[in-house]
Amino acid sequence: MPHSLWLKAAGTAAAVTLAAATAAHATPPTEPATTQNAAAVVTLRYDDSRAGGWEAAISAGVASWNQNVGNVRLVEAAPGTRAEIQIVATSGWPQATLGPVRPGGQVRVELGSQAVSQGHDKTRIAAHEIGHSLGLPDTKPGPCSQLMSGSSAGTSCRNAVPNAAERARVESAYANGLVSLTPADGRTLVDAY
């Protein structure tokens, strides 16, 4: 056998042996992620550029929602881009548009200073009003453990974390990466703190 043919045959045999050994130790291919086996996340942008004095409360309220629901992610909108949640500071009562807001839609949150002047916690107010944007109505009267009980929990309440039922309702509204087919309510809820 000529030398070049022998090298070609030896190379082919080595490649076949290597392929067989690799196949024997290969892991089966994984199936692609789907909405059934991996939850899709809905990203909603917020603009707080007109909420001076509330920055820390908004950051903490957003963090509370991001840490407690898995299929919705709230992110600060880049300057000049459209945001689904417009957050503004006002001198009146806290209020918000009842959602759930969809990507590309828009709701408004007004963080009113009258509640703060009466002793209510800024972070709880911010998280509560964002909860309205995500589709949660008030649950008044209610205990401090319910974020959506708002002012009815009293001025000593500092809880800014949604409870299990509130988390489940938001998760359901944004299930499988989609917002429920029911349109956002659109009513403005004035929280008479």
Image (tube, rainbow, N blue to C red):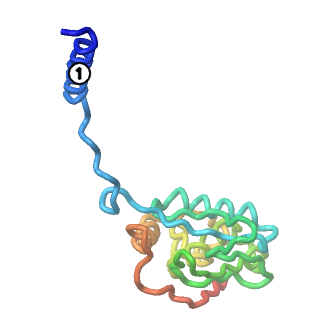
Q: Can residue 140 be seen in this view?
A: no
Q: In this view, does 24 lie to the left or right of 72?
A: left
Q: In which quarter of the image is residue 79?
A: bottom right
Give the quadrant of the C terminus.
bottom right
Q: How crowded is mark 1: few (under 14 residues within 10 Å), some or many (20 or more)?
A: few
Outermost residue toward the front in this view = 2
Q: Mark 1 points at which residue?
A: 12
Left or right: residue 39 versus residue 105 is: left
The front one of 16 and 95 is 16
| Residue 187 to residue 19: above or below | below
Task: List x then y, in percent, for residue 151.
Answer: 62, 77
> Which residue shows up at 67% across the image and 74% down it?
82
Q: In which quarter of the image is the N terminus?
A: top left
Residue located 63% across and 73% down the image: 154
Task: Indicate whether 110 appears above or below 119.
Answer: below
Instruction: State whether residue 191 is above or below residue 76.
Output: below
Image location (x, y in percent) of residue 158 = 63, 63
Q: Which residue is drawn at the image coordinates 64% and 68% (left, top)?
A: 124
Q: Position of residue 142 (x, y in %)?
A: 51, 76
Query: Residue 160 appears in which quarter of the rendering?
Result: bottom right
Residue 120 lies, in percent from the top left, at 70, 71
Inspect this view and state whether residue 157 appears.
yes
**Furthest residue in direction bottom, as rendered:** 187
What type is the residue that disc 1 sits on? Thr
For residue 35, side relative to residue 159 (left or right): left
The kind of secondary structure element at disc 1 is helix
